[in-house]
Image (cartoon, rainbow, N blue to C red):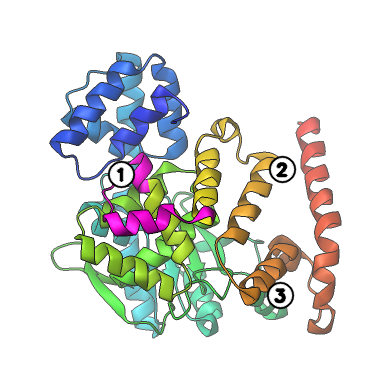
């Protein structure tokens, strides 16, 4: 059961491609909507304004004027930002090439082109770049020379602190001086080394044209499928945007291609993540699955639990009004991540990951011999941050 009629319409708008059957479903879902303000709130929360406006226009659904105006405004703003990110992605890849730093473009402009053939529909807010761990510091300095400044985990990161963060983390975030463009610089695609094994900067890259004459390097089809699965599972798929993009990438694949992509993800240790994503697309976005693969996935008790976790995250009302869903959301995410892999090595790695707070690593630099203290510091430092945040809110 979907959480509401309004959610059902948002999900229907995220289907791809927009076949005649999809348009009929969109019209039917729109006729059932009773709270258009809730619909707009869900579109904003799930960051699918471009997809929603496009789908509703093609389906000839007439919206109330007080809904049509803000929806159109948000879709246009998202399209403008996406176009700006395309231009900046090209510029940054050229800068990395000139500096001799190998880089691949993840998600963002590359994914928009792969999924929809255009940057106008997909919501993007940053540029995801993948470099080798040994290239993180020169890549960081290059971005700083291009007017980007660190925002996560701390404003300044270098020397032993950066080396320690590279060991425990997988990305840093930077904001352009203009205050709009953001970059996520990654050196790992997953926190757990048992996920996405062999998918890194040494894996064969794919050239993808963003315009008729300009291309970027990105993940191959199989690696992209596996990575998007793991990325969504890491966040419990709490935004429809991620599921819509994943679905659009594979919606026109043949049955044999779809099975091949799933087996590729299995080989990289991401079979459970990929299975969860496929079942969610099948359930929410009407993705047709090969019968044998569908039966295989639905027979897995663990996958059914993962789907339930994701549906709970998608429907969580707290994330409509808050930046996080509190302790319940944290617990849900941790549970999902432990269910997303198998084997003693996976569980040990996941326990180590969950026991070390990345903000702790960034703020408290310990010598390697004392790194065993990070799990012991996790809870008191977390409580301290929450307390300071609460006191600051009270003071304001």
Q: Quadrant of residue 170?
A: bottom right
Quadrant in the picture for the C terminus = top right
Q: Earlier in the sequence, mark 2 or mark 3?
A: 3
Q: Quadrant of residue 43?
A: top left
- The question of residue 284 being in magenta is answered with yes
**Callout 1: few (<14), some (14-19), or many (20+) C-alpha neighbours within 10 Å?**
few
Please tell me the numbered disc located at residue 161: 3
**Which one is nearer the viewer's eye here, 36 or 171?**
36
Q: Secondary structure at mark 1?
A: helix
Q: Quadrant of residue 212?
A: bottom left
Q: Residue at x 34, y 28 (%)?
A: 9
Tell me, yes or no, if residue 261 can be seen here. Answer: yes
In percent of width and height, residue 383 lies at 83, 49
- The question of residue 364 being in magenta is answered with no
**Which one is nearer the viewer's eye here, 90 or 225?**
225
Dominant secondary structure of the magenta stretch? helix
Q: Residue at x 56, y 65 (%)?
A: 172
**In this figure, which residue is indicated by the disc labeled 2?**
327
């Amino acid at each position: 059961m979907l959480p509401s009629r309004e959610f059902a319409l948002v999900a229907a708008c995220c289907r791809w491609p927009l076949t005649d059957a999809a348009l009929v479903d969109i019209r039917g879902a729109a006729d059932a909507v009773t709270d258009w303000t809730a619909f707009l709130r869900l579109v904003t929360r799930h960051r699918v304004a471009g997809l929603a406006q496009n789908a509703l226009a093609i389906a000839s659904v007439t919206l109330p004027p007080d809904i049509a105006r803000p929806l159109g405004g948000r879709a246009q703003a998202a399209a403008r930002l996406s176009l700006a990110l395309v231009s900046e992605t090209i510029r940054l890849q050229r800068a990395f090439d000139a500096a001799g730093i190998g880089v691949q473009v993840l998600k963002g402009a590359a994914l928009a082109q792969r999924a929809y053939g255009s940057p106008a529909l997909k919501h993007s807010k940053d540029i995801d770049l993948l470099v080798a761990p040994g290239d993180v510091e020169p890549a960081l300095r290059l971005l700083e020379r291009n007017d980007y400044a660190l925002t996560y985990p701390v404003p300044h990161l270098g020397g032993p602190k950066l080396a320690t963060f590279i060991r425990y983390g997988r990305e840093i975030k930077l904001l352009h001086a203009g205050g709009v463009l953001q970059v996520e610089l990654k050196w790992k695609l997953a926190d757990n080394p048992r996920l996405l094994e062999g998918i890194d900067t040494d894996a064969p890259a794919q050239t993808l044209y963003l315009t008729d004459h300009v291309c970027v390097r990105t993940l191959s089809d199989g690696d992209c499928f596996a990575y998007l699965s793991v990325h969504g599972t890491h966040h419990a798929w709490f935004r429809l945007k991620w599921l819509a993009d994943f679905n659009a990438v594979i919606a026109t694949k043949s049955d044999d291609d779809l099975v091949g992509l799933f087996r590729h993800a299995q080989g990289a240790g991401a079979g459970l993540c990929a299975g969860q994503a496929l079942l969610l697309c099948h359930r929410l976005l009407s993705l047709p699955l090969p019968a044998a693969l569908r039966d295989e996935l639905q027979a897995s008790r663990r996958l059914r639990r993962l789907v339930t976790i994701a549906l709970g995250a998608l429907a969580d009302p707290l994330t409509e009004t808050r930046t996080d869903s509190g302790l319940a959301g944290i617990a849900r995410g941790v549970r999902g991540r432990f269910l997303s892999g198998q084997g003693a090595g996976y569980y040990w790695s996941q326990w180590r990951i969950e026991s070390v707070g990345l903000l702790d690593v960034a703020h408290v630099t310990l010598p390697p011999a004392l790194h065993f203290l990070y799990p012991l510091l996790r809870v008191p430092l977390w409580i301290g941050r929450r307390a300071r945040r609460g006191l600051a809110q009270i003071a304001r």
